[in-house]
Image (cartoon, grey):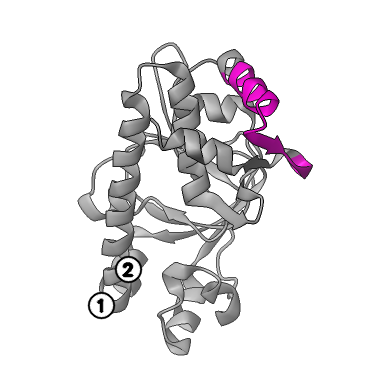
């Protein structure tokens, strides 16, 4: 794990690549760029523990991370997957409670951090940023409701279908063939979302492939075809 890097000024253009910062002025971006902390996390490294005290807010400059809850027997329940441009850790800074999930790097990732003190000084005091935080919290609440719907299905096949549909809605690109899930997901990742075994996911994906409902594209990206969407509407 890399050391924290202080004092490296980030350009306004690199900060504007984050939707969170796009409403800030050039001067605000310049000030913010000077106080962000950069840290590198290798694949499978823990970035934030569920019991950690709220010290930082995290912005993903590159890579992907997953927010999970880990059961007593070590099984992971994936709550969310965050990619470049996303952020996490804001809830703990807002209510001063411990993190609601453990966050783990799914691949080598570069993360920008802002301390609690600077979060309050540069972000919470900015009305434009505050409105964006409220909007994002509402969005995440809706996502949580959708995950609860996934887990409400007693049937494992319905869970897997619902997870793929949810990932398509959140991270999908539509074209003439259907919806392409842009995240590179392993069977284990999907299993963690659906609270089923990896073997169960493999079995159903093979079934969906044989039925022509999905297709595996380059780099293991999943294409959801219209026939898959038709089945979702019947759930």
Does residue 205 sit above or below 58 in this rendering?
Answer: above
In x, y percent, where is residue 175?
Answer: 63, 57
Q: Is residue 82 magenta?
A: no
Along the viewing direction, whichever of 208 and 85 lies nearer the viewer: 208
Magenta segment boundaries in residue numbering: 201-219
Decide which of tag 1 and tag 2 comes sooner along the chain.
1
Residue 43, quarter of the rendered image = top right
Q: Residue, x 47% and y 50% (percent of image)?
A: 170
Count numbered badges in the picture.
Answer: 2
Pick the quarter of the image with the N terminus: top right
Q: Is residue 206 magenta?
A: yes
Q: CA distance from mark 1 to mark 2?
A: 9 Å
SS class, disc 2: helix
Does residue 150 sit above or below 57 in this rendering?
Answer: above
Q: Main secondary structure of the magenta part?
A: helix
Is residue 29 visible in this depiction of the protein? yes
């Amino acid at each position: 794990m890399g050391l924290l890097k202080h004092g490296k000024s980030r350009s306004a253009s690199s900060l504007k690549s984050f939707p969170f910062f796009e409403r800030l002025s050039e001067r605000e971006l310049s000030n913010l760029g000077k106080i962000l902390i950069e840290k590198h996390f290798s694949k499978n490294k823990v970035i934030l523990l569920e019991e950690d005290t709220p010290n930082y807010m995290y912005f993903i400059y590159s890579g992907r991370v997953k927010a999970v809850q880990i059961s007593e027997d070590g099984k992971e329940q994936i709550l969310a997957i965050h990619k470049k441009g996303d952020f996490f850790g804001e809830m703990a800074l807002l209510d001063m409670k411990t993190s609601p999930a453990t966050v783990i790097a799914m691949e080598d990732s570069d993360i920008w951090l802002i301390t609690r003190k600077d979060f309050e000084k540069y972000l919470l005091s900015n009305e434009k940023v505050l409105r964006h935080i409220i909007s994002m919290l509402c969005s995440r609440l809706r996502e949580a409701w959708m995950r609860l719907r996934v887990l409400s299905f007693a049937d494992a096949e319905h869970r897997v279908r619902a997870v793929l549909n949810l990932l398509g809605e959140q991270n999908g690109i539509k074209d003439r063939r259907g919806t392409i899930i842009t995240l590179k997901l392993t069977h284990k990742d999907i299993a963690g979302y659906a609270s089923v075994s990896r073997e169960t996911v493999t079995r159903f994906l093979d079934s969906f492939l044989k039925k022509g409902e999905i297709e595996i594209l380059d780099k293991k990206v999943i294409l959801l075809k219209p026939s898959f969407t038709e089945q979702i509407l019947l759930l």
